[in-house]
Image: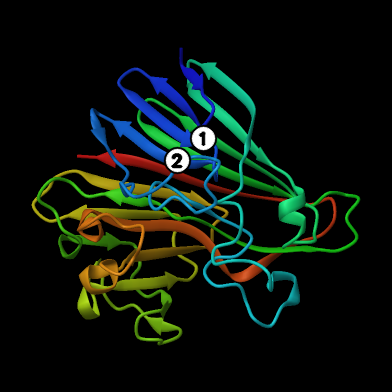
Amino acid sequence: MPVNVSSETVKLSLGASSVEVALKGATVISYVHDGRERLFVSSKSDIRTSDSTAIRGGVPLCWPVFGPPPSDNELFSKLKQHGFARTSVWEVADQQDSQEGVKVVFKLSPTEAIKSVFKLPFTLTYTVDLRPYTLVLTLHVENPSSAVAALPFQAALHTYFRLPQGVRPPDVSVDGLENLAYNDKVSGEQKVTERRKEVVVDGPNGEIDRVYFRAPNELVMRFKGQAETVKVTKSGFADAVVWNPGPKKGSTIADMEEGGYDRYVCLEGCQVEPFVYLDPGKDWTGTYEVSFDQ
């Protein structure tokens, strides 16, 4: 069967490719393409819906905030880092199988638990679309027409790309970020201009954590000594994040497997600045597509 729904996960299959999605957070926890696993998930992660913690790895969905919630807005004062979408249990709303591929649509609406930390109404739909050569992830946000206020939010698809055998984070570079302004969360610098054509995934103690603003809709990740590249094509998400904690900080992450920081690089499509403000009856869509080129 192209779609297999269990009590904890949904698996999509298409030829030799497959995608597995945990119902907790609608988190993509596996993407097998061309016989290889392309995503990193820490072995210490708990994918069960009965567990309240976020999954470390795969593609966690950050919403309605990215990073720590802003301290100057009471609406977000009860939220944890990256919001509640990545820890909430989503429902399967639809599934489709066609010549173009296999897709499953997940849905999240306010539950009593969500209402206790976030008072505004919303509807989120998240489509995981497995195609012969690509994986397409689409987040759709709606503010109901019955709402009495605008819906503000940030969003990110926090993608952990598994590195090829023998490749470490400092062997990875990203094209497409030259001349962009970025905030550096490691140094604390704000609105610095990137002057490099290829941004190497390295920094103080090996750590890099940057938000690049108004990033182009196509970014390419390259691996030293490897012909294959990862191409990310996005729309709706204005910004991009490059992140790896490095060995010093990575070894302090409680749910990170031993040495796990050396096995992935995050290159994510996100909407960080400014917040999106959706008026009642309006919607927003962000799409993130992953493909591999030789």
Residue at numbered disc 2: 28
Gap in Å between the C-alphas at discs 1 and 2? 8 Å
Q: Is mark 1 on a helix, strand or loop?
A: strand
Decide: is 149 above or below 30: below
Q: Quadrant of the C terminus?
A: top left
Name the foreground residue: 284 vs 161: 161
Q: How is the image coloured?
A: rainbow
Whether pointer 1 and pointer 2 mark residues with C-beta atoms closer than 8 Å, the reply is yes
The amino acid at mark 1 is Val
Is 82 left or right of 198, judged from the image as shown?
right
Q: Which residue is depicted at the point 66% across and 38% down?
A: 107
Decide: is 41 above or below 4: below
Residue 261 image position (x, y, % from top left)? 25, 60
The mark tally for this picture is 2
Decide: is 12 above or below 169: above
Tag of residue 128: 1
Name the foreground residue: 44 vs 237: 44
Q: Which residue is depicted at the point 35% across and 63% down?
A: 254
